[in-house]
Each structure stands twice: as C-alpha cells, then as structure tokens.
Image (spheres, helix red, strand yellow):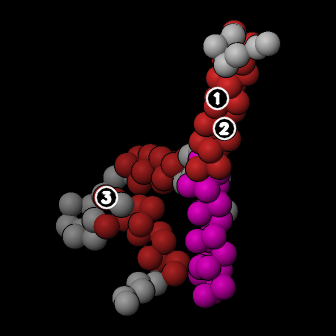
Amino acid sequence: MATLDSPPWILLCTLAALLAALWCAGRALAGAWLLRPRRVARALRSQGVRGMPYRFPSGDVHDYVRLVAAACSQPMPLSSHAVAARVAPFDHGVIKEHGIYLT
C-alpha cells in the first residue's frame, strides 16, 4: 500500500502546486499588463479621447524616444521661452492634440 511519503505522491503534489502557482501568476500578469490597459483605452474611447493603441510590453516608449530625439536635434532660438515642446515633446503633442482636461 502506498503512503503519502512515497516519492511518486510527493512528485505529483509538487507538480500540482507548481502548476497552480504558475496559473495564478499568469492570471495576475494578464490582468495587470494586458487587460487593464485595454479596459482604460476602451473607457477613454467611449469618452471620445482617441490615442495610440496599446502595445505590450513597451507601450509608447518608442514614440517617446523618437519625439525626444527629434526635438533635441533642432536648434532652439535664444529669445524663445516656449520650452514645453523641447522639454516634454510627447506630453506637448498630446495636449496640443487633445487639449487640457481639468477635472
């Protein structure tokens, strides 16, 4: 008669616990990284705010880097005080496109 101390049962229980932990971790990651951004995007679209589609896992990092590089490559006049487009080009573009929403 087999007992719980025999190696096949220990291996089977360990494997079941590992699979359960991996399943829970996968559900948590899917909820945090994939479903939440899509839910927010759907809510924003229903309010009329359009934007870039969510790209996993980097999001808008590529666009942000491209805009910063483009802003830094152009010289800025010394007499200009409009530095927002130079300091935060991504944020400046979003505000210019969608306006400022104060709630």
The residues bearing labels 2 and 1 have C-alpha atoms spaced at a distance of: 5 Å
> Are the residues at dot 1 and dot 3 in contact (C-beta closer than 8 Å)?
no
Q: Observer-nearest residue: 22 or 60?
A: 22
Q: Is the C-beta separation of discs 2 and 1 under 8 Å?
A: yes
Tag 1 secondary structure: helix
Residue 20 disc label: 2
Q: Amino acid at mark 2?
A: Ala
Left or right of 67 on screen, residue 27 = right
Image quarter hosting the N terminus: top right
* Label 3 element class: helix
- Front position in the image: 53 or 95: 53
The crowd level at tag 1 (other Cα within 10 Å; few <14, some 14-19, many 20+) is few
Q: Of helix, strand and loop, which one carries label 2?
A: helix
Residue 7: percent from left, percent from top? 69, 9
Magenta stretch: give its range: 29-52
Alpha carbons under labels 3 and 2: distance apart: 47 Å
Residue that badge 3 annotates: 87
Q: Label 1: which residue?
A: 18
Place of residue 68 in the rendered image (x, y in percent of width and height, measured from the top left):
42, 51
Residue 98, labelled with which disc?
Answer: none
